[in-house]
Image (cartoon, rainbow, N blue to C red):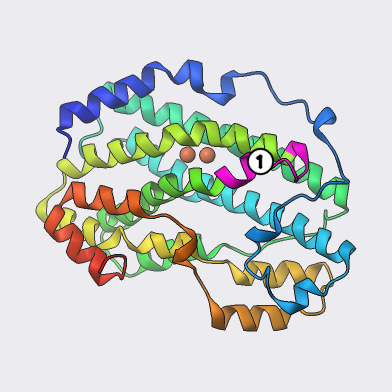
Amino acid sequence: MQTLSQCHILLKRMNNVWEKRSQVKKQEIDPTPLLDPTKPDFRVDLLPFQNHQAFQEADPEMKNKILSCGWLIYNWKTVSIELKVVNPVCQDIIYHLFPGVSNAIIQEVATDTLVDESYHVQLVNKACSITREQRGLQHLEAPEFNLVLNLQREQALYEEEWQKMLIKLATSVVSEVFVSDYLKLLSTDTTIQPLNRVVVDTHRRDEDAHSCIFKNLVKCIYAELTREQKEFFINVIPKPVYWFADHELEIWQSLLEQIGFEQSQVIYTDCQQANRHNLMNIDYSEVIELVQELDHQRGEESLVNMGLMN
Ligand SMILES: [Fe+2]
Ligand SMILES: [Fe+2]
């Protein structure tokens, strides 16, 4: 395990390069030359029902509409993670609500990250508006994501404020570790609409740095927790791995219904039975590594209990 001062040095380094690497400091994207409505908005292999007969037999126009929904859901999930998971944790750090965060470097890193994430919300929201306008999908509305509902349900199980905050912290670090992978596939895909690829790639450039920032922030906080709090955190941290891997089928069913896809209920029922979440598609080795670094023995017990380790 890195020492606390090593974590601080690393965070200082990240803070020093923020102005150079941060996308909010770069020139704003001009969407006009990047629009190509003849290309699909999203990748078929990212749909949780890509192999379902009802989808495969849909006509090309409906398939493209479904792919546009995929793009919107992908962006809405990003906005939910930024606004309901990551930014609230940055705010908790700025308000010194966690132990071990009063250091000036940690404070600067938290405010830098808050700016980055707010920029991502702006970036992604604009992209959604363009897609809605271009594809005539202004009427679509989505229910809440299971990722957020699961976080809230877990928090509701506990009385103490510190327990609720640690659940949110665990969810944010897991999300920050996964989000780069989540963005990687689309960021290099030249078969989708160019604007969509550029938006995802711009976001990914910041997220590559965030994963390291959050892991180090968690290490700084964890070192200052009480024994009881440490045990609580170690037990809770594997849970968001499942929440992140959730296929969000309720949102899919709602959107498919809203665009008039007649097979929406069949797809929902079949996919729900087959795979509510699919850990096969996500690489959670970095989460395992982090948990082991925080507390090797307890960490492994917790990972085994939650089925993330044998
Ligand atoms: Fe972000
Ligand atoms: Fe982030």
In reply to whether residue 77 is colored magenta, the answer given is: no
Residue 103 visible in the displayed image = no
**Which residue is painted at 49% across and 43% down in the image?**
180
**Which residue is painted at 19% across and 27% down in the image?**
6
- Cβ of disc 1 within 8 Å of ligand 1? no
Specify start and end residues of the magenta stretch as a single range. Answer: 184-195
Q: Is residue 214 above or below residue 279?
A: above
* Pick the front one: 96 or 223: 223
Please state the horizontal and vertical placement of residue 261, each as a whole percent of the image. 82, 73
Number of other residues with Cα within 10 Å of mark 1, as a class: few under 14, some 14 to 19, many 20 or more: many
Image quarter where the C terminus lies is bottom left
Find disc 1 in the rendering and name its residue: 124
Question: Which secondary structure, mark 1?
Answer: helix
Please state the horizontal and vertical placement of residue 88, each as a whole percent of the image. 43, 44
Q: Is residue 104 above or below residue 3?
A: above
Image quadrant assignment for residue 143:
bottom right
**Which residue is painted at 34% across and 48% down in the image?**
286
Image quadrant assignment for residue 271:
bottom right
Residue 251 visible in the displayed image = yes
Please state the horizontal and vertical placement of residue 37, each as a whole percent of the image. 87, 44
**Which residue is painted at 50% across and 21% down in the image?**
21
Q: Amino acid at mark 1?
A: Val
Please state the horizontal and vertical placement of residue 117, each as a whole percent of the image. 52, 36
* Pick the front one: 251 or 245: 245
